[in-house]
Image: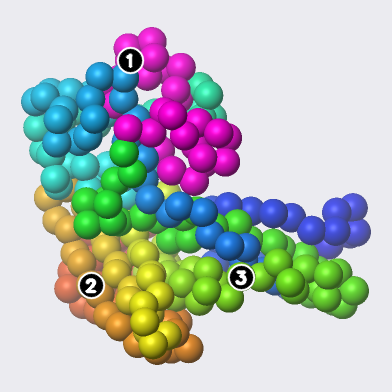
Amino acid sequence: LDGRADLAVHSMKDVPMEFPEGLGLVAICEREDPTDAFVSNHYNSIDELPEGAVVGTASLRREAQLRANRPDLVVKVLRGNVNTRLAKLDAGEYDAIVLASSGLKRLEFHDRIRYCVPAEVSLPAVGQGALGIECRTDDTELLELIAPLNHQDSANRVKAERALNRRLEGGCQVPIAAYALLEDDDMLWLRGLVGAVDGSKIFRVEGRVHRAEGERLGRELGEELLNMGADKVLAEIYGHTPT
């Protein structure tokens, strides 16, 4: 805001729902692979992991879905940057770890990915794999320069996901997932999920609309999740019920 930087580039899954006055999200770049990546030195998939195997993740969203699909696994917190996390795996602290496919690919760690986890098994985080550009909303010259970087297909998908997340008052450290795909005839398919961290409850919704109505669908699906009981799950994390 004081002019020391012209713009900021963010991972969209970490971008808050609201911006300070005078700043805004002005472009969403073409999305990289939004899936979660299964990384292991000994196993090819989650299904191959033996009972009691230790899986590392720092994401409550991933933990909830892992525990729901494989309650026999031991899920442990995994902290640090990508290199640190891979080093912990290689040191034998974990049998497998789950990271964002996009981060590994951007860092050219393609060979560490055993497989990209299907959305049916681990629904991605809101905006995962996309980069967004933030700048001052009164900088008209910069806005014109940035405009060509906006990838409309990616923007439609991410904005629908963020609309669902906004209705749930979500952030990047809550067990909320949302994933939108564009289909034929400009239809947008949006799936959403809220899970208890222990995997005991998973609430799922989905819907299809024309891509221009994606944000409305996101709000509606967020409301549907709350009505299904996700409000109680989120209240335990937030300390209050989403309104």
- Taking 25 as reference, is 238 left or right? left
- Taking 24 as reference, is 173 left or right? left
The answer to whether the residues at label 3 and label 1 have Cβ atoms under 8 Å apart is no
Q: Can residue 243 be seen in this view?
A: no
Image point 31% across, 25% down: which residue?
40
Q: In this view, does 178 lie above or below 163?
A: above
- The amino acid sitting under disc 1 is Glu
Query: Which residue range is magenta in the image?
Result: 85-114
Check disc 3 and report the residue beneath it. 151
Q: Is residue 90 inside the magenta stretch?
A: yes
- As helix, strand or loop, the secondary structure at mark 3 comes to loop
Q: Quadrant of the C terminus?
A: bottom left
The answer to whether the residues at label 1 and label 2 have Cβ atoms under 8 Å apart is no
The numbered dot on residue 93 is 1
Q: Is residue 155 visible?
A: yes
The answer to whether the residues at label 3 and label 2 have Cβ atoms under 8 Å apart is no
The numbered dot on residue 205 is 2
Tell me how the rendering is colored. Answer: rainbow
- As helix, strand or loop, the secondary structure at mark 2 comes to strand
The numbered dot on residue 77 is none
- The amino acid sitting under disc 3 is His
Image point 90% across, 74% down: which residue?
141
Pick whichever, 170 or 38, lies toward us.
38
- As helix, strand or loop, the secondary structure at mark 1 comes to loop
Which comes before the other along the chain, label 3 or label 2? 3
